Image (cartoon, helix red, strand yellow):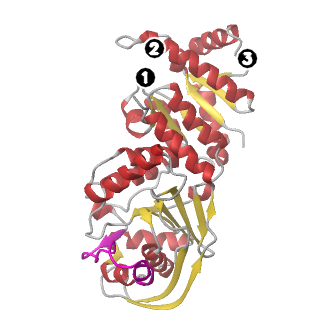
Amino acid sequence: MQKKLFCNIDLLIKGFEGYDNMQIVKFRDTVLDMLNKLALLNNRVIFLSRNPEKVNKAKKFCEKRGYDKFDFISREVARDFINDHSKDSNAFVMIGTKDVDFQLAVNNKILLIAPVWLPIEAKVGKYGVQVGNPKQLLQLLSIVVKNENWYAEINVDSISKCIALYDARTMVGGVNENERQMLCNFQNLLKQGASRNYYQILLYYFLANMTRDKTFDNITIFGVVPSSSGRINPELYGFVEQIRFIKKVMLPTGLKDFSMKEQNLLVRHRSKPQQHGGSQRGRSTIGGTHEFETLCLNGAYKSKIEKLRAEGKLNICIFDDYMNYGNGFNAIRCLLEYIGANKIIFVSMGLFRQSFYKKDYIITGNVFAPGYGYELVNQEILNNYQICFAAKQEIDYLYEVYNPRS
């Protein structure tokens, strides 16, 4: 699919007061060469500004340097074009510095990339995917333009799908040192709350890759799986908040100023027994018992769920740190099917197994409170994960360009 890259004209300015302008000029020239190569590959590069004089000046500057594949338009023309092609918004990317870029991006559910070597305004800095140099920008755009797959996908049933962003096995063959370090950081994060960089890399990868996948276009509720203790991982919840903001998915009325735990769709009403110990067979056969006995849906969502179900728009996406045998997702999937979900997407940061232990349960009672009933009626092992090793390499290189070796 041809991508349309809308670029704030600030990318062409040679200097700003208080900034390293020699570096800005160097980065500008590098970015221009990079964007030109993308334009030659049948992508559209569109520079925009509300100032007609700046638009004309930028066009003359680029044409003088031989960049004749770029387009130059006013912000109003860009806004009208994007509004007229809203069904194609997955093909759009905004590289911006101003909050008006943010508004244009968020109103149209467009990925926003923030080049932080330039002055950027507050909302762009908070909600944009930050790039600190042209190499990071190039890697993100290469994912947007070239990548066609997640690391792992499996269709569990007619309405449910699992997506894994990365291979979380550090001890298998072929894992290079960058991957091992990244995954060790992730495991430390799970155990001790150590490294935060893992989430940033996977968030940026997810947002870049999300632009080509319509799976997430009609999601109406996002949530995360609480930890065994009931705690909500703030990094993972921040990940979901940013995605929800980009997709313009609102929380139920009245929850805006509440805590993460009170805002989340899933509630761990009492601690769940740890499953890190014991045999693999024991962990794989435990099924959803521990989840059903400790997990329910947030009652604050009940009205919204009923409304969305009546409209045929109850599409739910749940994020978790990692997936091993699928015990947690099985339980959550059955709860969401019970309340009438049309689509269920489960996204795990890491995947430890390449098989899924599918277990189907009949649910009875009130799932918005503890004590509902559940009965296992069917189980099978699914081994039909679609694995894309190129996606794994994309994340590995993205990690490398954000964490260069000294």
Kind of residue at disc 1: Trp
Percent position of residue 217, x then y: 58, 55
The number of discs equals: 3
Q: Quadrant of the C terminus?
A: top left
- Residue 300 is marked as none
How many C-alpha atoms fall within 10 Å of the one at disc 2: few (<14), some, or many (≥20)?
Answer: some
Whether residue 283 is in magenta: the answer is: yes
What range is drawn magenta here?
266-286
Which badge, 1 or 3, is on the more N-terminal residue?
A: 3
The residue to which callout 2 is attached is 23
The residue to which callout 1 is attached is 117
Percent position of residue 351, x then y: 49, 62
SS assignment at label 2: helix
Which badge, 2 or 3, is on the more N-terminal residue?
A: 2
Q: Are marks 1 and 2 in contact (CB under 8 Å)?
A: yes
**Residue sitting at x 51%, y 14%:** 26
Q: Is residue 50 left or right of residue 276?
A: right
